[in-house]
Amino acid sequence: MVDSDLARLYGVPTSRLNEQVKRNIKRFPNDFMFQLTKMEADILMSQFAISSKKNGESKLNKLSQNETSKWGGTRKLPYVFTEQGVAMLSTVLNSERAILVYPVK
């Protein structure tokens, strides 16, 4: 899952989710998460544009922090999490929804 979708699911800003991952990076090996390349992010963005057209207008969903800033250009490429990475996120995010979404017992 893409970091921005997970942030919405857990009820936190994408920047906070990524900040917590960076603070706990040892808990997220390469098989738990990875960062998309520019080409992969562009392909994913184009799929969102095609699937969300309404009345001839494209409504692009914002992917991660990979959005165009008011100063131009993109900020960061999105991170993608595997099933194990999603489970680990619930242990590092301190939000009520993270606890409800994936209770660790």
Image (cartoon, rainbow, N blue to C red):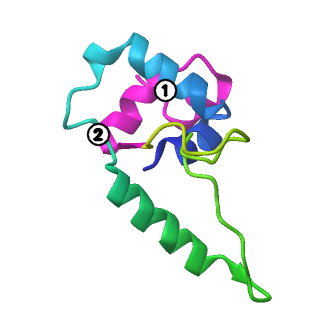
Q: Residue placed at 19% from the left, 38% from the top? A: 31
> Where is residue 78 shown, x and y percent of the image?
45, 43
Q: Residue placed at 61% from the left, 47% from the top? A: 67
Which kind of residue does numbered mark 2 sit on? Phe
Which kind of residue does numbered mark 1 sit on? Asn
Q: In the image, is residue 68 above or below residue 103?
A: below
Q: Farthest bottom residue?
A: 56
Q: Are marks 2 and 1 in contact (CB under 8 Å)?
A: no
Foreground pick, 66 / 80 = 66
> Where is residue 15 shown, x and y percent of the image?
59, 27
| Snapshot quadrant of residue 22 | top left
Q: Farthest front residue?
A: 71
> Where is residue 80 shown, x and y percent of the image?
38, 45
Q: Residue placed at 75% from the left, 88% from the top? A: 56
Foreground pick, 91 / 29 = 29
Q: Which mark is residue 7?
A: none
Q: Farthest top residue?
A: 23
| Snapshot quadrant of residue 72 | top right
Give the extent of the magenta segment: 79-105
User: Can residue 99 be seen in the rendering of this structure?
Assistant: no
Q: Is residue 77 left or right of residue 35?
A: right
**Image quadrant containing the C terminus:** top left
Disc 2 to disc 1, how far (Cα)?
12 Å
Foreground pick, 86 / 101 = 86
Residue at mark 2 = 34
Residue at mark 1 = 18
Q: Is residue 83 left or right of residue 77?
A: left
Q: In the image, is residue 3 above or below residue 1?
A: above
Q: Secondary structure at mark 2?
A: strand
Q: Farthest right residue?
A: 55
Q: In the image, is residue 17 above or below residue 4?
A: above
